[in-house]
Image (cartoon, grey):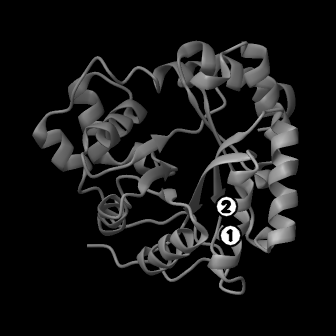
């Protein structure tokens, strides 16, 4: 989503109460996201803004330039969380994290993290961050009812790394009979029950819903005036078969699912 529509959606989301915004150079909308934040007039301290560095920009010189470019496009004094969007085996992780630490020390970013890192790579990143003098804040991963990633989520939590779920509703999960059944029983939209499932699951991560429609933005924020029963939680936690929607040619070897 680009241009004025993106800025309007960000503005609407902030007005409703959203305080976490996620973007990336590869999305092509950092400038519009920044414009929406600026139009809102919100106190910057109330917002958490995440962007990413792409796998072709993980060498220090390119990474530093990418982060500066993102900050300029967003129009912010700093980036709250900078993620390595995808691992790149051709670039030593310690080299990348040392450059990210440099960005922390210079005030360009506040926290460092990764995305799409399976357990073995996560451990390498944690060790690399420690050597660089920093800590890994988060691992953004694909999580939804048909891909709960329990093993990886638990590994993140055990290591003190915050798991953040992207694509939290999947692409087909909202039409799954189990999801539709829970939605009918609770009188809620399918998206609402899936997002509520994320919130109620103590081992599941913070979800990032993605939408460009104002009505959906509102609906997806109305999650705190109802609860799912234990049986409904169990139903949503057993949606299958396993489906992974984001696995490009350069993806790492994924962890097995339980």
Closer to the camera, 100 or 249?
100
Disc on res. 101: 2
Q: How many marks?
A: 2
Going 36% across and 48% down the picture, which residue do you hit?
176
Q: Residues within 10 Å of mark 2 (few under 14, many from 20)?
A: many
In this picture, is 143 found above or below 149? above
Q: Which residue is mark 1?
A: 98
Q: Residue 44 at what x, y percent from top left?
A: 67, 23
Q: Residue furthest bottom?
A: 90
Going 65% across and 73% down the picture, which residue do you hit?
248
**Left or right of 98, for residue 244:** left
In this picture, is 119 found above or below 231? below
Q: Residue 45 at what x, y percent from top left?
A: 61, 24
**Left or right of 51, for residue 238:** left
- Please state, as top left, top right, bottom left or bottom right, where the N terminus lies in the image: top right
Is residue 93 visible in the rendered image? The answer is: yes
Q: Residue 64 at what x, y percent from top left?
A: 82, 60
At mark 1, the secondary structure is helix
- Please state, as top left, top right, bottom left or bottom right, where the C terminus lies in the image: bottom left
Going 86% across and 69% down the picture, which residue do you hit?
61
Q: Residue 184 at what x, y percent from top left?
A: 26, 29
Using the rendered view, name the quadrant where residue 210 is placed.
top right
């Amino acid at each position: 989503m680009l241009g004025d529509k993106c800025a309007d959606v960000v503005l609407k989301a902030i007005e409703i109460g959203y305080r976490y915004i996620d973007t990336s150079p590869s999305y092509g909308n950092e400038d519009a996201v920044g414009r929406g934040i600026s139009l809102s007039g919100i106190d910057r301290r109330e917002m958490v803004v995440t962007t990413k560095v792409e796998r072709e920009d993980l060498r220090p010189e390119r990474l530093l330039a990418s982060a500066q470019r993102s900050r300029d496009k967003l129009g912010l004094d700093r980036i709250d969380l900078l993620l390595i969007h995808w691992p790149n085996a051709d670039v030593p992780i310690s080299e990348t994290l040392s450059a990210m630490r440099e960005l922390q020390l210079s005030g360009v970013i506040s926290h460092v993290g990764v995305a799409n890192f399976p357990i073995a790579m996560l451990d390498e990143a944690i060790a690399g961050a420690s050597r660089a003098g920093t800590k890994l804040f988060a691992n953004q991963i694909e999580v939804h009812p048909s891909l709960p990633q329990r093993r990886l989520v638990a590994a993140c939590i055990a290591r003190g790394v915050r798991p953040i779920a992207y694509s939290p509703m999947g692409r087909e999960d909202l039409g799954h009979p189990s999801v539709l059944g829970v939605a009918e029983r609770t009188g809620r939209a399918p998206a609402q029950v899936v997002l509520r499932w994320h919130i109620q699951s103590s081992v599941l991560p913070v979800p990032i819903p993605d939408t460009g429609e104002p009505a959906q933005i509102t609906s997806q924020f109305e999650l705190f005036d109802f609860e799912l029963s234990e049986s409904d939680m169990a139903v949503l936690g057993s949606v299958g078969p396993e489906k992974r929607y984001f696995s490009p040619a350069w993806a790492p070897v994924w962890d097995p699912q339980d």
